[in-house]
């Protein structure tokens, strides 16, 4: 158990809909990273927040957005969903704002039908 | 981000050491070398990281070549629970850039 929690575990929704994925980092960690893992693209970095501020964006679509709240939990919002957005979404946390040791949650499996 | 090259798969026997190679010929002076692994149906798990010197922790050892163009993750005594995809990653500006990794198969 990494100490990172993600909810929900599974999500099934229809194209065009909007969903919110939630992540609670390990106690004491200030950074949250979001990743997408699909069969054809592998694990891709989406976005990084450190202590409430956006630090970097990776391959995140404009239809996706995220935020980190004062209690340090983070939410990833996915809108206008397409079939190709079906994937596993992981969040990871680390203490500092560098990538040295990231601890990953169990993931949220999103299925868009 | 600089690129890494790993074998697609490797096979080893239980209770034997495993050496997982990684080539990173375009590594820059400030890039750290990270290893993560992903067990089936789980999120990636941090294994080890290093910059120039060899590193040891309770999970593994990391041997880094003197020119830093390659490294080797060493599992000293493989168990069936070590069967996973192992990713060698160079630290980029921020998030980790995962490649395809090495699928490690452990035979009992």
Image: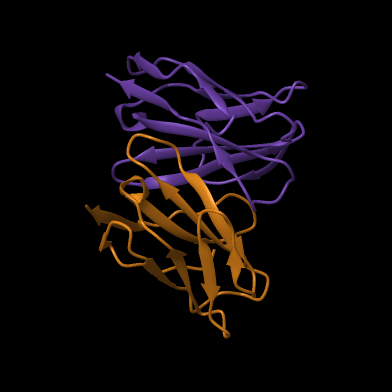
Q: Quadrant where the N terminus of chain B lies?
A: bottom right
Residue drawn at (22%, 52%) of the image: B108
Way the structure is coloured: by chain
Residue B86 position by quadrant: bottom left
| Residue at the limit of the structure toward the front, as seen here | B15
Residue A66 position by quadrant: top right
Residue A93 position by quadrant: top right
Q: Nearer the viewer, residue A54 or B99?
A: B99
Q: Horizontally, is B13 left or right of A19 in the view?
A: left
Residue drawn at (55%, 24%) of the image: A5
Q: Nearer the viewer, residue B63 or B99?
A: B63
Residue B77: x and y, percent?
39, 60
The answer to whether B7 is drawn above or below residue B68 in the figure is above
Question: What shade does chain A have?
Answer: purple
Chain for colour orange: B
Residue B87: x and y, percent?
43, 56
Residue drawn at (32%, 21%) of the image: A112
The answer to whether B64 is drawn above or below residue A47 in the figure is below
Q: Horizontally, is B73 left or right of A51 in the view?
A: left
Q: Nearer the viewer, residue B62 or A103?
A: B62
Residue B15: x and y, percent?
33, 58
| Residue at the limit of the structure toward the left, as seen here | B107
Q: How many marks?
A: 0
| Residue at the limit of the structure toward the bottom, as seen here | B67
Q: Nearer the viewer, residue B85 or A68?
A: B85
The answer to whether A87 is drawn above or below residue B51 in the figure is above
Residue B18: x and y, percent?
36, 65
């Amino acid at each position: 158990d990494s100490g990172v929690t993600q909810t929900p575990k599974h999500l099934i929704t229809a194209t065009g809909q909007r969903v919110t994925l939630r992540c609670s980092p390990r106690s004491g960690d200030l950074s949250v990273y979001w990743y997408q893992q699909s069969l054809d693209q592998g694990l891709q970095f989406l976005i990084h927040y450190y202590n409430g501020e956006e630090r970097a964006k990776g391959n995140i679509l404009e239809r996706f957005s995220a935020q980190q709240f004062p209690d340090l939990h983070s939410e990833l919002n996915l809108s206008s969903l397409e079939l190709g957005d079906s994937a596993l979404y992981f969040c990871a946390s680390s203490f500092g704002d560098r990538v040295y040791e990231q601890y990953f949650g169990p993931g949220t499996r999103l299925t868009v039908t | 981000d600089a690129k890494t090259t790993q074998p697609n798969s490797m096979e080893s026997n239980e209770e034997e050491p495993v050496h997982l190679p990684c080539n990173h010929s375009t590594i820059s002076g400030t890039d750290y070398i990270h290893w993560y692994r992903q067990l089936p149906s789980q999120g990636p798990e941090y294994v080890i990281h290093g910059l120039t010197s060899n590193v040891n922790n309770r999970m593994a050892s990391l041997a880094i070549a003197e020119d830093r163009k390659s490294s080797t993750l060493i599992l000293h005594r493989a168990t069936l629970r070590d069967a996973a995809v192992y990713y060698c990653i160079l630290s980029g500006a921020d998030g980790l850039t995962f490649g395809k990794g090495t699928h490690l198969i452990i035979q009992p």
